[in-house]
Image (cartoon, rainbow, N blue to C red):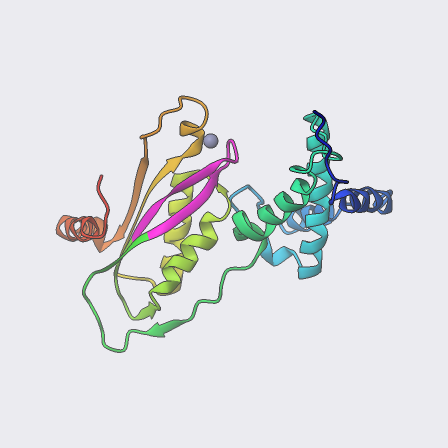
Amino acid sequence: MTISYPRPAGAENREAREEWLVTQNGKKPISQVIRERLITTGTPFYANDSIAEFISDAEREELKREIEAKLQSLFESMIIDTTNDHNTQETPHRVAKMYVDEVFKGRYHPMPKITDFPNAKELDEIYTLGPISVRSACSHHLVPIVGQAWVGILPSDRVIGISKFNRIVDWVLSRPHIQEEAAVMVADIIENLIQPKGLAFVIKAQHMCMTWRGVKEPETKMVNSIVRGLFRADPHMKKEFFDMIRGQGFND
Ligand SMILES: [Zn+2]
């Protein structure tokens, strides 16, 4: 029995990609334009850095087209027939969009707007938030890191809405990362925004580069914590923080 497939629905897109490549002939790729801007201003552009403020909305669209064309070449090098394989025809397009607008949006899109307020009631008790979903990818293999995070704050004279912690975590973690550096980045942003008297941040996550490949160890999770200010100076406060987040699903 012969199975006949319909004409690939994404053929026009593949042709569009090829046409786009022709128009690029002799033109500086947008990635190079942006890279030169970063180098000129001495801005680092490691995998876990945000470069959003150096990219306009139009350039971001152009960048997706460039990434899509490069992904098409990757599929060709992997000898996958994207012309006839209905499953992968649109994959370069989908993955480029997924990288720039979704899973790595923390590199290419600006931080969500976060307004801080005066601590009008002069709250001076610890509060904790969690679990906050952690979704990231490891810088080494670009495979998912999935887990949870908890924040503890001993407020000073500024506060932010509690959902903003989730937004900060989502934005920072939506980049290729290693977990320890991600935790420091989140803590730094919170510290800059509200200068709390005490700040604690814990991530517990599973790294697919250990479960899906490599040692293929399904249960191992990595936990790391940042404690600053009074949470670091005062062991009782640190203990209170960990006791509180145990009530919010954290177990170490
Ligand atoms: Zn990895």
What span is in magenta? Answer: 132-150
Pick whichever, 76 or 124, lies toward us.
Answer: 76
Looking at the rendered image, the quarter that the C terminus falls into is top left
Question: Would residue 43 be seen by someone viewing this image from the given angle?
Answer: no
Magenta span: predominant SS is strand
Looking at the rendered image, the quarter that the N terminus falls into is top right
- Residue 228: x, y in percent? 28, 51
Pick whichever, 133 or 126, lies toward us.
Answer: 133
Q: Residue furthest top?
A: 215
Q: Residue furthest left?
A: 236
Question: Would residue 83 be seen by someone viewing this image from the given angle?
Answer: yes
Indicate whether 145 appears above or below 127: above
Residue 154 sits inside the magenta stretch: no
- In the image: residue 124, left or right of residue 54: left
- Residue 155: x, y in percent? 26, 65
- Residue 232: x, y in percent? 22, 49
Residue 149 sits inside the magenta stretch: yes
| Residue at left offset 72%, top offset 52% | 62
Pick whichever, 157 or 164, lies toward us.
Answer: 164
| Residue at left offset 49%, top offset 63% | 112
Q: Quadrant of residue 164?
A: bottom left
- Residue 15: x, y in percent? 81, 43
| Residue at left offset 42%, top offset 57% | 168
| Residue at left offset 40%, top offset 42% | 146
Q: Residue furthest front?
A: 1
Q: Please count the marks in the image.
A: 0
